Amino acid sequence: MKRQRENYARRAMRELRKTDIILSQDEFARVGAFYAKPWLREAHDAIFELISLCESGAQKELIFDLLDRFVYFYEQDISNCVDYFFSHCIPIWALSTADTVIAPLHNDIRADSSQAVLHRISNEMKKPGKVRLDDYNSAFRAAHAHNAQKIVLVDEFVGSGDQAISVVKSLREHLDKHKIESTLFIFSYTAMGRSKSRVSPLVADFEAARWMKRGISDFNSFTQRKKLISEMKEIETKLAKTGFLNGRPRKLYSLGYRQAEALFKNHSSSTPNNVFPIFHWPWLSDGSERQTVLTPA
């Protein structure tokens, strides 16, 4: 372990020498520690470019703290979430083949990572001894199944809760229109803790295998929180307010969409727009592009 840390430190030093960035000994030690994180190991150029946007030690320390708190999901993490669904949600919600269907948490307009969650859970259900639930690519089609007394909507990440609320309200309207009586549940691999109070009143239960805290606000006192948010917004002034990605106009959301302050990404999915833009927004205020720690949202 000691030798590995030394190797990471040497590599960090080699990369740092290619830049004109000056770091204190403590700051360098924190950067070197990032090389122990597989998802950051090859992002050294982006990390140094990010550090270069900081104008004070306080801003650099904030960035380091957020990267330390960041939750990056790999296959094992996903497996743990699927296991949680089978060990916790299925028995607590009393789900069975006879009365339950499962579908992605989206509104049929644009499929997203919720489809991948459905696929993963569906594959797990095929294993011996697992409860099997009929799965559908659309909650609106699932609602018409003979055993749709319970509908479980699944997703990878619930940030502000806006999409979940939109889907549930649309599905409720659909059920009412067709005089269908169904009980709705939501399961997500991860979710921001603040989304629970917004979404839970609309469904029988809303569960996540991992509840996420806001990267700044939930880790600091009120006074410190205000100061650190001000520091982050100062860093964000270096970024362009708008941009185009894949031919579509994009808008920068300060602190993440609805100021969610999210620190989460699944290795196989795009970056949620609830994540701090400083980690994924690729355009600088002067119109140039920059390397980012995460793929653009």
Image: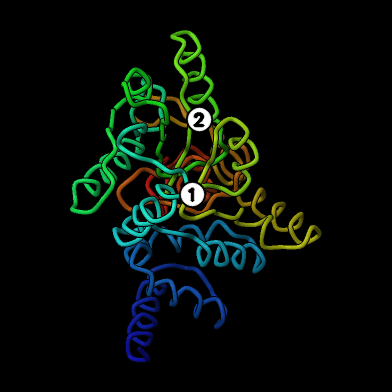
List the residue tagged with mark 1: 208
Display colour scheme: rainbow
Residue found 40% across the figure and 44% down from its top: 156
In-image side of 180 versus 138 (left or right): right
Cα distance in 3D space between marks 1 and 2 = 16 Å
In-image side of 130 versus 83 (left or right): left
Instruction: Indicate the amino acid at tag 1.
Output: Ala
x, y percent for residue 245: 38, 32
Q: Point out the residue furthest to the top here.
A: 177
List the residue tagged with mark 2: 163
Query: Residue 279 versus residue 14: which sits nearer the camera?
Result: 279
Crowd tier of the residue under label 2, counting other residues whose Cα lies within 10 Å: few below 14, some 14–19, many 20 or above:
some
x, y percent for residue 89: 43, 48
Query: Residue 132 versus residue 117: which sits nearer the camera?
Result: 132
Residue found 46% across the figure and 15% down from its top: 175
Q: Point out the residue furthest to the right here.
A: 223
Q: Mark 2 falls on what kind of element? A: helix
Residue 255 vertical position relative to residue 61 in the rendered view, above or below: above
Q: Between tags 1 and 2, which lies in front?
A: 1
Residue found 63% across the figure and 33% down from its top: 201
Residue 71 vertical position relative to residue 125 in the rendered view, above or below: below
Q: Mark 1 falls on what kind of element? A: strand
Quarter of the rendering occupied by the N terminus:
bottom left
Instruction: Indicate the amino acid at tag 2.
Output: Gln
Residue 22 vertical position relative to residue 125 in the rendered view, above or below: below
In-image side of 156 versus 75 (left or right): right
Residue found 51% across the figure and 67% down from its top: 68
Tell me which numbered mark, 1 or 2, is placed earlier along the sequence: 2
